[in-house]
């Protein structure tokens, strides 16, 4: 049985689509990973912002390091923070969204859950749950995820 930390780390992305037309998909993403909703203006924006969230959390961990051709100096680590009492640390910790709040969010056009289990081969692997009693659909890449979302547009 998984402990509570691993359960919370596998929280899905709740994608609330507000507008979906032939050229564009816009909406918001809610998750227990996040401290506030993330608005996206198109599918690329969605993928890039969520990739940034995963990199910041280091979960799901990328299996490959990103290469850069920048000549900029790497950032130096921040100086160690002052030791806080447990009650002070709890007050300063970012407040993540509660599961009940995330579950209550709905998109104007559609709502679905995206689970990202791994990030191998510079892409995402996981499954999508359409929340309409359809069976979940596995995907092996971000491109396949985009195709699934695009195909759902045709069913509207």
Image: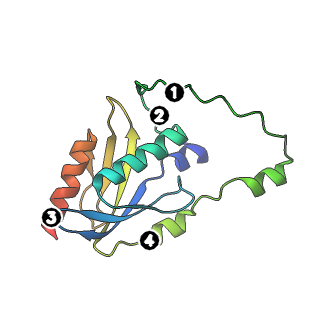
Give how far apart the Cα atoms at labels 3 and 1 are.
40 Å
Give how far apart the Cα atoms at labels 1 and 2 are.
25 Å
**Along the polypeptide, which appears first: circle 3 or circle 1?**
3
- Tags 4 and 2 in contact by the CB under 8 Å rule? no
Give how far apart the Cα atoms at labels 1 and 4 are.
41 Å
The residue that disc 1 covers is 72
The residue that disc 4 covers is 105
Quarter of the image with the C terminus in it: bottom left
Camera-nearest residue between 44 and 14:
44
Give how far apart the Cα atoms at labels 4 and 3 are.
24 Å
The residue that disc 3 covers is 22
The residue that disc 2 covers is 61
Q: Nearer the viewer, mark 3 or mark 2?
A: 3
Residue at (52, 37) in percent of width and height: 58
**Along the polypeptide, which appears first: circle 3 or circle 2?**
3
Q: Residues within 10 Å of mark 4 (few under 14, many from 20)?
A: some
Instruction: Residue 43: give its label.
Output: none
């Amino acid at each position: 049985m998984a402990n509570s930390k691993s359960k919370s780390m596998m929280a899905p992305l709740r994608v609330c689509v507000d507008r979906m037309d032939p050229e564009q998909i816009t909406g918001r993403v809610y998750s227990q990973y996040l401290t506030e909703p993330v608005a996206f203006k198109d599918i690329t924006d969605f993928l890039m912002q969520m990739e940034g969230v995963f990199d910041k959390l280091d979960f799901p961990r990328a299996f490959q390091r990103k290469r850069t051709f920048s000549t900029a100096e790497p950032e130096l680590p921040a100086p160690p923070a002052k030791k806080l009492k447990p009650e002070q640390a709890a007050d300063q910790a970012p407040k993540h969204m509660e599961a009940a709040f995330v579950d209550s969010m709905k998109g104007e056009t559609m709502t679905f859950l995206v689970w990202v289990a791994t990030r191998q081969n510079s892409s995402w692997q996981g499954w999508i749950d359409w929340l309409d009693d359809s069976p979940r659909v596995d995907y092996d890449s971000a491109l396949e995820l985009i195709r699934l979302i695009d195909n759902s547009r045709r069913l509207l």
